[in-house]
Amino acid sequence: MQDPKSYRIDELAARFGLAARGDASGLVSGVAPLARAEPGQLAFLANSRYVPDLAGTRAGVVVLRAEHADASPSPVLIAPDPYLAYARIAALFDHEPATAPGVHPTAVVAANAHVDAGASVGPGCVIESGARIEAGAVLGPNCVIGTDCTVGSQSRLGANVTLVTRVTLGKRVLIHAGAVLGADGFGIARDGNHWFKVPQLGGVRIGDDCEIGANTTIDRGALEDTVLEADVRLDNQIQIAHNVRIGAHTAMAGCAAVAGSASIGRDCLIGGGAGVLGHLEIADGVTITAMSLVTHSIRAPGTYSSGAPIEENRAWRRNAARMRQLDAMARRIADLEKRLEALTKEHR
Amino acid sequence: MQDPKSYRIDELAARFGLAARGDASGLVSGVAPLARAEPGQLAFLANSRYVPDLAGTRAGVVVLRAEHADASPSPVLIAPDPYLAYARIAALFDHEPATAPGVHPTAVVAANAHVDAGASVGPGCVIESGARIEAGAVLGPNCVIGTDCTVGSQSRLGANVTLVTRVTLGKRVLIHAGAVLGADGFGIARDGNHWFKVPQLGGVRIGDDCEIGANTTIDRGALEDTVLEADVRLDNQIQIAHNVRIGAHTAMAGCAAVAGSASIGRDCLIGGGAGVLGHLEIADGVTITAMSLVTHSIRAPGTYSSGAPIEENRAWRRNAARMRQLDAMARRIADLEKRLEALTKEHR
Amino acid sequence: MQDPKSYRIDELAARFGLAARGDASGLVSGVAPLARAEPGQLAFLANSRYVPDLAGTRAGVVVLRAEHADASPSPVLIAPDPYLAYARIAALFDHEPATAPGVHPTAVVAANAHVDAGASVGPGCVIESGARIEAGAVLGPNCVIGTDCTVGSQSRLGANVTLVTRVTLGKRVLIHAGAVLGADGFGIARDGNHWFKVPQLGGVRIGDDCEIGANTTIDRGALEDTVLEADVRLDNQIQIAHNVRIGAHTAMAGCAAVAGSASIGRDCLIGGGAGVLGHLEIADGVTITAMSLVTHSIRAPGTYSSGAPIEENRAWRRNAARMRQLDAMARRIADLEKRLEALTKEHR
């Protein structure tokens, strides 16, 4: 009997609609990087940076674009998008341990909370008044689901996740450990010489199929909800302030931050550590490169950047000192142009 | 009988010392943004960005400055600071669920810890040796209060908050979920080819009325305490290193970070993602804009910035490449000036 | 009988191989900063910034370099590296409360997990299937140790730490509260108009003697493990993406972030808030200054920086506006040079 975790290359080709070349009768039982894959493993080539690894690969099969097929010493599976095809195949080897439904005896569930019989609530979880956990949802250990929060069906929360209050998750939402959704937005009003805390009366709404990274924070709205539309993908340690809206399919890399009431379009890519100031709009299809700061609305799709390039420190010091003289330099250039013009005229 | 959550406009005017204009007999039972408020709701206009929403508002009443009163189609409440007035009114509609005093049976409290009978300790909390929880304090689920920590009276901790060791909170301190106070400062000394860990013998002292955001970290001091004076307001994911001092009423936006032994004055505003290097001082009343890096002491109040502006990526690439030539450009300008001067003299 | 926590100066000199000058018969029972130390306390002078504090110190003894000995009003201990010598002495005064071995009755341990009899598992911890906790390891309250994770001997975890899956810690690893290791790497592949989640099949391997700060996140690898070699020191709120490798003895300050598949050498220093893009390499012995962004591989040791200097906001606005004109300015300079050259030739 064939090992249920092994797949023939031609079987994979048929299953995922890929063209096979070379001997397609081999078996693969796992995946590995091109440079280190063994004969029983599948590798892929998507990033041109790794083309040099192809010639020496020992992989049982390589998923790649047609243009690289001839250069492969191993059998290949040809895909227009090898990374996507690889991802689909790799999912065959990803064995999430099954979680039995039910509420762990150490969990604390408020009398008027609702936990579906098909949901799984881990040890140490606390589910507060008015919360709802829908069918197929899985809560990792020590999660806290606050007042009037809803965890949609098939959603999965890692350990130590907190939904504070008025947070609604759609279906199939994935939240990694340590994330905090629905904490108070940062609203303070100056009152004489001290601060008055502005009530945060809104909630958080997370669309279907969103993924939210470890230790990411999404505050609830001041007046209305903070909203992530469907299929938004947030990496770790991202900060989303109150009243922010993020359009469907937008992805943000680690440590990005969005200030209050900013509105980001659909299909945007926000680079790691990038910042977006408050009360502005970013159009659909905008890419912001890593550690850039968006200070005004962006109305057209495209790629936008800020920042200064990295240099050896001594060169950087010399150049950075000149950044403080830039306006003066520009004026000196204009002055030179004027004087040279005058002199040239005089001379002729 | 009037709904206890509805308020007449003239009642609000009297209660908060505001002048009403228009029909002040209407009732409001909630708050909403100017553009979307319904007749039974109160809205406000503070940020001039939202002036265009005023003409079409359906709000039952709008809190605004006198200069905008005539332009409002709805009755108005006039306030010198509409945001503050709004915040005070909105607090009427903010119903934090009451927390009964007492220690949840799943909490674990060390024999020599002290929990006031008027404090509330949530499920799964762990209170270690020598800790004190004072009257009216509320600990959310799964908080850990370490050795010799004190939670002052009326302070409130969200879920999963950790006070590690020697952390003292004043009165009415608010700490959001996932924050960690009192972890070891990052002190390492090079010892041959490896690192020696420097003991972190200080603590953390948080003044009355401070607010600390979700997943924010405040390390304890190496020798002395890390100190936040009264009414300091920290947003989410802020990092405060060991021995830092922050003056009263200073507010910091999300993801800002302060390195060891820096001292920040009173009434400062530190923008989101801004950084402050260690062993320096910032005067009272300083504003640092978002994502700026403070590299030396700032002695005078005012607003300070660093960074390069965002641009369409191709333009940015061309300009950024020139940043590496800035010093050379400055020398070329000086050289041009000298040569033009010489030529001019020669010519005359 | 002498207080067991007091030490004679000459005893410290002998114990740590330091030369004493002045009356070495005094006792010290604690440590304090130079400016505030009392007669019974030891202080140190390592950073030249604090030389002005030496003349007025009341410390019982000062650890310093030979060059500063004559200027001290107090007895001194002379050390080539006073910070390291101080750290070794200060460790005498650092009394971590002893932790009794055993599993707290509120902890939940899977039937097929292994907890060594000499390990300590705090209240509320959850240890999942296949996990191993080795001898002398200490887990703070509410930690979650996921499937197939290993906590090496003598390692210590603060409260609320999560090891998600396939995380292996070496010996004597120290992890501060709220850190999350082994969450899914951020792998998404575009599939038509939505995202397909790429399986994250690797793990995380942490070498002996590493230290990992509060709320720091280290994702597990996509195909292979994310790796920290021995004695890597990470401060708080650092983000390490999937497949990253960090060489031995490298230290990173708070809020730094490293993108996927980057490889950082040994003995590097990465400043606070610095960013490292993915799929690149940094050589051994590289220093990156605070908030710099590494956008390409760095092949030679040395110090590297990016960013623009901080200025008073109005000056900064004027200069920053010119950054958008830099390429044009450079062309104008070149044009001026050409025209001036031509004019000069003509003139002669």
Image: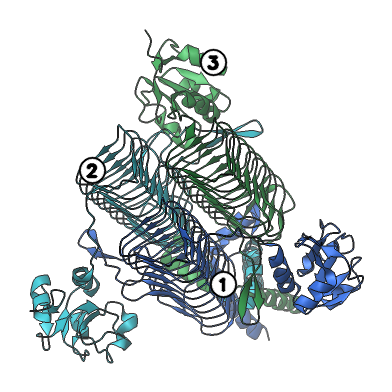
Chain colours: A blue, B cyan, C green
Left or right for A299, reference B212: right
Q: In what quadrant of the picture does the N terminus of chain A appear?
A: bottom right
Compared to A342, does C130 lie above or below? above
Q: Are marks 2 and 3 on the same chain?
A: no
Of labels 1 and 2, the one closer to you:
2
Q: Chain of mark 3?
A: C
Q: CA distance from mark 2 to mark 3?
A: 44 Å
Q: What mark, if any, has residue A251 been given in the picture?
A: 1
Q: Which residue is mark 2?
A: B134
Residue at 69% across, 58% down: C261
Return the x and y of residue C260 as percentages of the image width and height.
66, 60
Callout 2 secondary element:
loop
For residue A217, side relative to residue A98 (left or right)? left
User: Dot 3, crowdedness within 10 Å: few (<14), some or many (≥20)?
Assistant: few
Q: Which residue is mark 3?
A: C15
The kind of residue on which mark 1 rests is Ala
In percent of width and height, residue A9 lies at 84, 70
**Residue positioned most to the top:** C1
Residue name at image x 44 percent, y 17 percent: C75
Residue type pointed to by label 2: Glu
Query: Are labels 1 and 2 assigned to the same chain?
Result: no
> Mark 2, chain letter?
B
Question: Closer to the observer: label 2 or label 3?
Answer: 2
Q: Amino acid at mark 3?
A: Arg
The residue lying toward the viewer, choosing from B341 and A198, is A198
- Residue C79 in picture, x, y percent from top left: 55, 23
